[in-house]
Image (cartoon, grey):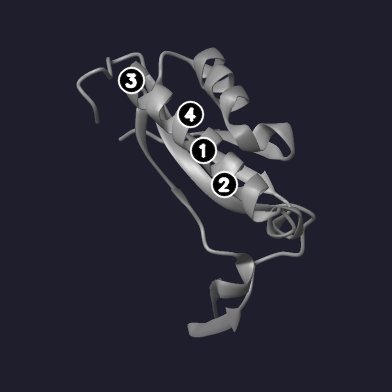
Amino acid sequence: MTERMEADEMRYLLMICTEESAIGALSPEEGAAMLARYAAFGEEMAGRGVLLGGERLRPTTDATTVRVRDDEVLVADGPFAETKEQVGGYYLVDCQDLDEAIEIASRIPGARHGTIEVRPIWER
C-alpha cells in the first residue's frame, strides 16, 4: 500500500478490454501515438499518487489457461473464453471511493475504443 492510502480508501483493478485485432491493425504512427497517450496517463496518475502499478499484457494467442477437474490439471493454449474484447492490460490504483476510480478509468486511453472494467479488490 502507498503512503497516500488511508483507512477509508480502496484499491481497484482497472482492466483495459479492447479488440486485439483493432490494436494490431494500427499503423506504426498510430501505435506510437497510443503508447504516448498511455505514458502520459501513467505519469499523471503517478503524480496524483493513485497509481500502484500496471502492465500491458501479451496477446491472448500467448495465453495459457489452467483448470482442475477431478484433481486433474488441464492446460490449454489461448484465452479462457471467446469474447469480442480481450483484457490487454491493467492498472492498480488506490482511490478515495468508486467515483474517483471511475474518473481515473475514464481517462485511460483504451476507454475511447474499448471498455474499462473497474473491480474493487478485497482488502484483508
CA distance separating discs 3 and 4: 10 Å
Q: Extreme front residue here?
A: 29
Left or right: where 84 falls relative to 72? right
Q: Amino acid at mark 2?
A: Ala
CA distance separating discs 4 and 1: 9 Å
CA distance separating discs 3 and 2: 22 Å
Q: Quadrant of the N terminus?
A: top left
Viewer-side residue, 6 vs 27: 27
Q: Amino acid at mark 3?
A: Gly
Q: Amino acid at mark 4?
A: Phe
At x 60%, y 41%, the residue is 34
Please tell me the numbered disc located at residue 32. Answer: 2
Q: Examine the rendering and report whether any part of residue 9 can be seen.
A: yes
Q: Extreme right residue here?
A: 84
Label 3 or label 1, whichever lies nearer to me, is: 1
- Mark 2 surroundings: few (<14), some (14-19) or many (≥20) residues within 10 A: few
